[in-house]
Each structure stands twice: as structure tokens, then as C-alpha cells.
């Protein structure tokens, strides 16, 4: 059964905490990154502790691991999802602007965020 994809976005004006709106965006991205890093730390710590209880030392095997094409493809898919979450605020602003602007304004916006 396919469940409809729900767009998780907040409509309306976003609160601004810093004098510069770009600082707010950067702050949001850094908080998303910090959350991801905390989850990764906990998972890695858990894996190492579970392995150690079973007498397995992972450090050497991890250092020697070479991912095959399937693993690389899975990692790339994860990376794309991660970047999608990281740039959430930029996409939201872009969606808002697209609803109100023409193609020239859209291109200027893309040029602006590409700097």
C-alpha cells in the first residue's frame, strides 16, 4: 500500500533569531548536522560495545573494509537524503519564492545561494 508523501514544511514567515537571515539558515543547518552526528556517535558506540561483549575487535576490520559498488550506491543514496535534510531551509525559501516570482528572479536566487 502506497501512503501519500506528506510535505513537512511550515508555511508562513519563519521566526528570525539573528540580525542576519543567513546566520539563521546556517544555524539551522548546523543543528541538523549536530543531530545527525549525535545519532551516528550513539550507533557507532553501541556497535563497538556489542562487538566487544562478543570478543570482536572492529577497528582493524573497519580500517581494511573496501565497499563494493552496491555499498557505494547505498551510501550515495543516504548522502543525497542527508543533503536534502541539510538544505531544507533553502528549499523551503526557494519554494516560497517560486510561488511568487518569474524565471529571471528564480535564476538570480540560484546564483545568490551558489556563492
Image (cartoon, rainbow, N blue to C red):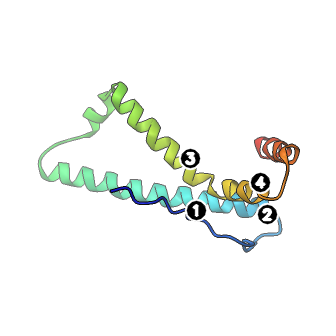
Of the residues under marks 1 and 4, which one precedes in the sequence? 1
* Label at residue 21: 2
> How many dots with numbers?
4
Where is mark 1, residue-wise? Answer: 31
Is there CB contact under 8 Å for labels 2 and 4? Answer: no
Task: Tell me which residue sits at (82%, 64%) in the image.
Answer: 20
In the displayed structure image, the side of residue 93 where residue 50 appears, left or right: left
Of the residues under marks 2 and 1, which one precedes in the sequence? 2
Is there CB contact under 8 Å for labels 1 and 4? Answer: no
Of all residues, the one furthest to the front in this rendering is 1
| Disc 1 crowd, CA 10 A, few/some/many (<14, 14-19, 20+) | few
Q: Position of residue 65 (x, y in %)?
A: 30, 29
Of the residues under marks 3 and 1, which one precedes in the sequence? 1
Of the residues under marks 2 and 4, which one precedes in the sequence? 2
Quadrant (top left, top right, bottom left, bottom right) of the N terminus: bottom left
- Determine the image quadrant of residue 39: bottom left
How far is mark 3 from mark 1, CA to CA? 13 Å
Where is mark 4, residue-wise? Answer: 98
In the displayed structure image, the side of residue 84 where residue 44 appears, left or right: left
- 55 or 95: which is nearer to us? 95
Above/below status of 22 relative to 83: below
Amino acid at each position: 500500500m502506497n501512503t501519500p508523501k506528506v510535505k513537512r514544511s511550515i508555511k508562513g514567515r519563519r521566526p528570525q533569531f539573528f540580525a542576519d537571515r543567513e546566520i539563521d539558515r546556517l544555524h539551522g543547518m548546523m543543528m541538523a548536522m549536530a543531530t545527525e552526528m549525535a545519532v551516528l556517535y550513539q550507533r557507532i558506540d553501541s556497535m563497538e560495545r556489542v562487538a566487544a561483549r562478543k570478543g570482536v575487535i572492529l577497528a582493524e576490520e573497519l580500517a581494511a573494509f573496501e565497499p563494493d559498488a552496491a555499498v557505494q550506491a547505498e551510501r550515495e543514496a543516504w548522502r543525497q537524503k542527508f543533503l536534502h535534510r541539510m538544505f531544507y531551509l533553502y528549499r523551503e525559501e526557494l519554494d516560497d519564492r517560486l510561488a511568487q516570482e518569474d524565471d529571471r528572479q528564480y535564476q538570480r536566487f540560484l546564483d545568490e545561494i551558489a556563492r
